[in-house]
Image: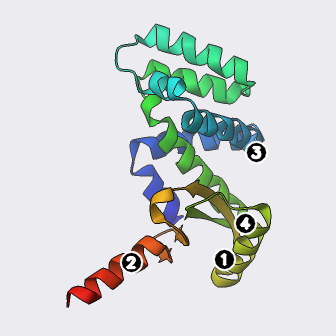
Amino acid sequence: MEINSGIQASLSGRYAVALFDLARDANALDTVAGSLAGLKAAVAQSPDFKGLINSPVLSRDVSGQTIAAVASSMGTDPLTTKFLGVLAENRRLGQLPAVIRAYETLLSNHKGEVRAEVTSAHPLTKTQMGALTKSLKARVGRDVMLDAKVDPAILGGLVVKIGSQMIDSSIRTRLNTLAQAMKG
């Protein structure tokens, strides 16, 4: 698999591949994905959690104990909890967001899906997400999983990234293009 070899080239990718292989062997791919989704949300929503995984001053032991307590309180599955312990022991908790993205990519490839990163100025409704998923599926010919992000700086429209392809229909880009055209 071309994509898997690309993922394995990075440190976070190697950790993700190891977790994916363990989860596949334990028939726990979706369980681990659910736990990782919870951790991804925690990183995005909690400055304290983000500080914990990025803290260079915490010892391996303290970091490991703290992440184990957090994982337990979140109801993280045992395999993911052990994996977090390995990241803490190796002082790689800061790689967690990249590991999660790589795992999601591996899982999508395994299921025959493609992942699309969608950035909008405002949160998309379920109806909008459904229409976008249908449209992207027609374009790429495969099931599409959306990773939605909100960035008010794009002002409006969407920025969709599928692999190395980017579709930018944001108002910010259109205004910048217009400004460049007016400069001559």
Mark 3 surroundings within 10 Å by alpha-carbon count, few (fewer than 14), some (14 through 19), many (20 or more): few
User: In the drawing, what numbered circle is on residue 129?
Assistant: 4
| Mark 2 or mark 3: whose residue is earlier in sequence | 3
Query: Which residue is farthest left?
Result: 184
- Disc number placed over residue 175 in the picture, else none: 2
Which amino acid lies under the numbered mark 2 shown in the image of this protein?
Answer: Leu
Q: Nearer the viewer, mark 3 or mark 4?
A: 4
Whether residue 115 is visible: yes
Density class for disc 4 (Cα within 10 Å; few <14, some 14-19, many ≥20) is some
- Marks 1 and 4, Cα distance to the nearest angstrom? 10 Å
Residue 170 is situated, as x and y percent measured from the top left of the image, at 49, 73
Q: Please report whichever mark, 3 or 1, sits nearer to the chain's N-terminal start.
A: 3
Q: Is residue 143 above or below residue 18?
A: below
Q: Is residue 74 above or below residue 118?
A: above
Q: How far apart, in angstroms, are the residues tagged by discs 4 and 2? A: 25 Å
Going from N to C along the chain, the mark reached first, 1 or 4, is 4
Using a 10 Å C-alpha cutoff, classify the residue at mark 2 as few (fewer than 14 neighbours), some (14 to 19) or many (20 or more): few
Q: Are marks 2 and 3 in contact (CB under 8 Å)?
A: no
> Label 1, on which residue?
136
Front residue of this view, candidates 131 and 104: 131
Asked if labels 1 and 3 touch by Cβ distance under 8 angstroms, the answer is no
